[in-house]
Image (cartoon, rainbow, N blue to C red):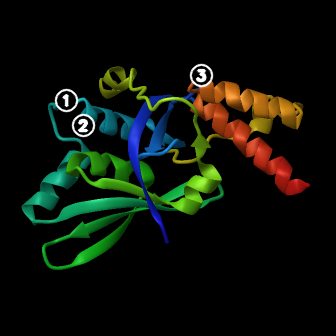
Amino acid sequence: MKKVKLDIVGLSYSQTQSGAYALVLGEVNGRRRLPIIIGAFEAQAIAIEIEKMTPSRPLTHDLFKSMSETFHINIQEIIIYNLVDGVFYAKLICNDGKNTHEIDARTSDAIALAVRFNAMIYTYEFILASAGIVIEGNDFLFLENMDSIAKEPDAETVPSTTSQQGFGELTVDELQQKLQEAIADEAYEKAARLRDELHKRSSSQ
C-alpha cells in the first residue's frame, strides 16, 4: 500500500470544539491537507517541541523519549494507517537495534513523539483521498498560534459534520463555492466539514 509523507503545516485553536485544537498535516510535494482535531495537552506537547521550549519538568512525551533513549529504542516513523467513523488510527515503528516493532498509539501522541525523535510522518493514499483537502496556490505555513499554545497550562477526529454547522440547507453548488472560499482563507476545519457534507450527499444519491 502506497505511503504518503506528511509534514506539520498548522496548529491552531479549534473553531468548532471548545478546548480542542486543529492539527493540519500537509502532503510533502503535494497540495493536500489532512486536518485532525486533537486535545489541548497533545497540542501543547507538539507546540513545545516545535518551539524548542524546555518545560521545568519533563512532559509525558519527553519522559517517553528519555526512557526510549536509555534503553536504545528509536522511533523511525509513525504511520496514520486507518480512518474509521471519523477517528484516525496511528502506530509507531520502533527499532531497538535488532528488531523492528509496531506499537499502536493515538494519532496526537504519535505526532508529539515524532517531532521529538525527528521521525517521518506517513499516511496511506486512501486516507488522503477520503479525508484530505486539496488547496490551491503556493505552499505555506500557518503556525502563528504555536507560541501561545506551548505556554498554556481527547479528541482525534475529523471535524464534526456540516449539517450541525448550518450547512445542511445549502445546495451542492453553494457548498462547492463555500468550500473553495474556505480553502482560499486557509480555514481547513470549515473546509473539511463542507467536504464531508458534499461526500454525504453524493453517497446518498
Q: CA distance from mark 3 to mark 2?
A: 27 Å
Kindly report which numbered mark, 1 or 3, lies closer to the viewer in this rendering: 3
| Marking on residue 185 | 3
State the SS at label 3.
loop
Kindly report which numbered mark, 3 or 2, lies closer to the viewer in this rendering: 3
- Is 183 placed left or right of 78 in the picture? right
Rendered image quadrant of residue 166 = top right
Residue matched to label 2: 49
Q: Residues within 10 Å of mark 2 (few under 14, many from 20)?
A: some
Relative to residue 52, is residue 120 depicted above or below?
below
Between discs 1 and 3, the one toward the N terminus: 1
Q: Amino acid at mark 3?
A: Asp
Residue matched to label 1: 53
Q: Residues within 10 Å of mark 3 (few under 14, many from 20)?
A: few
- Is 87 placed left or right of 10 in the picture? right
Can residue 69 be seen from the camera position used here? yes
Q: Position of residue 110 (x, y in %)?
A: 36, 54
Q: Amino acid at mark 1?
A: Met
Mark 2 near mark 1, Cβ–Cβ under 8 Å?
yes
Residue at point 22% right, 47% down?
116
Between discs 3 and 2, the one toward the N terminus: 2
Task: Name the foreground residue: 64 vs 52.
Answer: 52
Task: Name the foreground residue: 198 vs 149.
Answer: 198
Pick the quarter of the image with the C terminus.
bottom right
